Amino acid sequence: MANKEFLRRKQEKIMEENGIIYLENVSKSYSTGSPAINDITLSIKQGEFVFIVGDSGSGKSTLIKLLLRELTATSGAVYVMGQDLAELKHRQIPRFRRNLGVVFQDFRLLNDRNVYENVAFAQRIIETPINEIRRNVPTILATVGLAGKYKAKTKQLSGGEQQRVALARALVNRPSILLADEPTGNLDPKNSWEIMQLLEEINEQGTTVIVVTHNREIVNAMQKRVIAMKKGIIVSDQEEGEYIDED
Ligand code: ADP
Ligand code: MG
């Protein structure tokens, strides 16, 4: 127990000093090609809203996967909530991931289930008591504007609605960090704006939000921190930044 307490303090200290996300000289190579991530050092503070922009192939999704511990760094250290991800044992990964909500371009819903089931599923995995699930799911569906749709099969929903379900599922376990990899890539402008506004509201309630996007108009309008990547490196990192051109 003393050891656990020591570890917790150590993680809190790393978080205080370096942020909720901290990459120190991180590189990631796949078996072929040049490194997808090449010696990146990056710190994101708790409560920040960060856009990650850059060409296709510049390493954005690889960065997200490193944070989710879907991949491990080839060299350097990745800390999430003060935890060195290289030190995580396999059996510790599910518990670690409870800290993270994740949303993808292609929604990744269970298409044979209804809206309620898709969101409740995330709570069942972490063994939330049924009475809490019955309370939490409607609350989060209301937050994303889907209170009236809980019985609908996801296939019957529009793209924008499907992404709201995915967002509700990502948030229902109250993660500290929300990672969104091109969440509006399949949406029309109106739905893209609505999803981004939801992400901003979630951020205002304290969740750290990281959004990979190609949506220049939204990035320029929202005045958030913008990290631009190119060929595996960070080429610019600006507070209240703008979308950086891809060439
Ligand atoms: P982005 O999300 O910015 O489009 P990615 O992180 O997906 O970029 O890819 C970065 C680079 O790594 C690309 O050159 C891509 O081809 C390569 N890459 C991505 N995933 C794999 C993989 N599983 N195996 C081999 N190379 C990969
Ligand atoms: Mg990608």
Image: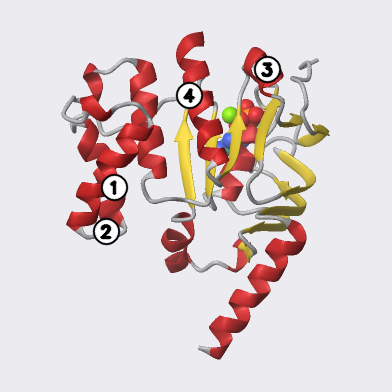
**Disc 2/disc 4 C-alpha distance (Å):** 27 Å
Residue matched to label 2: 128
Write the residue at 22% across / 60% down.
129
Front disc: 4 or 1: 1
Report if residue 197 is visible in the image: yes
Which of the marked residues, 2 or 3, is nearer the chain's N terminus? 2
Task: Tell me if the residue at label 3 has its CB under 8 Å from ligand 1.
Answer: no
Q: Which residue is mark 4?
A: 195
- The secondary element bearing badge 4 is classed as helix
Callout 4, which amino acid? Ile
Q: Position of residue 8 (x, y in %)?
A: 59, 75
| Sequence-first tag of 3 and 1 | 1
Q: Nearer the viewer, residue 118 or 63?
A: 118
Distance from the alpha carbon under mark 3 to that under mark 4:
14 Å
Q: Which residue is mark 1?
A: 136
Tag 3: amino acid: Ala
- Answer few, some or many: residues within 10 Å of disc 1's Cα (few below 14, many 20 plus, some between 14 and 19): some
* Of 15 and 35, the residue lying toward us: 15
Mark linked to residue 221: 3
Badges 2 and 1: C-beta atoms under 8 Å apart?
yes
Q: Residue at x 47, y 25 (%)?
A: 105
Q: Does residue 21 appear left or right of residue 139 in this picture? A: right
